[in-house]
Amino acid sequence: MDYFEQESERLKFRKLTTKDISSWTEFFDDNDRLHFLGMDLSKNKQELATEWINAQLTRYEKQGFGHLAVEIKETNEFIGMGGILPRILKDKNEYEIAYSLKPKYWGKGFGTEIARQIKEFGLKNIETDRFISIIDTRNIQSANVAKKNGMKVLFETEYLEMDVDVYGYSLNKTEQ
């Protein structure tokens, strides 16, 4: 399976391009969860969207992974992003399952569907002991998605100056 061309029941995944920047600015409208992301919120939404997408294009080049654009199959609406983000956490190479949705698509099960699809891809295609999700300790919605994706809290730490729970799905049966 190609990382950059995945599908789930309702969604399709593709590479982001700079053409997605204008649509991604909607992510920053009426979003009361931005403080969970560790971003410089003094910047305007155009700057934030540009930096976010350019960071993914760099990840594609350097790591072969990154957030993918997520669209509804039936309408081709760009609703958010999801993907595998290589991380170094506590001096260990990790693979984070991450996603972000535009606020108007919250509460419809898309976050869970994205996370499950990304985990499924990872299980079939990446050799690792576990997958993680780094979640601000106050972000109850994302914590619930991680739990629905078969993850549990492995440890608490600080990440991007935030207190976070690191959820994980271990392939090593002794860690589960």
Image (spheres, grey):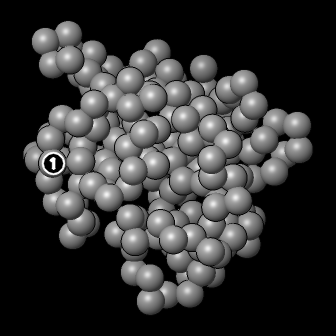
Q: Quadrant of residue 126?
A: top left
Across and down, in percent, residue 132 comes to 31, 36
Decide which of 11, 154 is in the foreground and name it. 154
- Viewport quadrant of the N terminus: top right
Count of numbered tags: 1
Across and down, in percent, residue 173 comes to 20, 10
The residue identified by callout 1 is 156
The residue positioned 14% from the left and 53% from the top of the image is: 157
Does residue 46 sit above or below 93 in this rendering? below
Q: Is residue 16 visible?
A: no
Q: Quadrant of residue 5?
A: top right
The residue positioned 44% from the left and 82% from the top of the image is: 41
Q: Amino acid at mark 1?
A: Glu
Q: Is residue 82 visible?
A: yes
Q: Is residue 85 left or right of residue 12?
A: left
Circle 1: element type: strand
The residue positioned 47% from the left and 70% from the top of the image is: 34
Across and down, in percent, residue 83 comes to 51, 42
The residue positioned 38% from the left and 64% from the top of the image is: 36
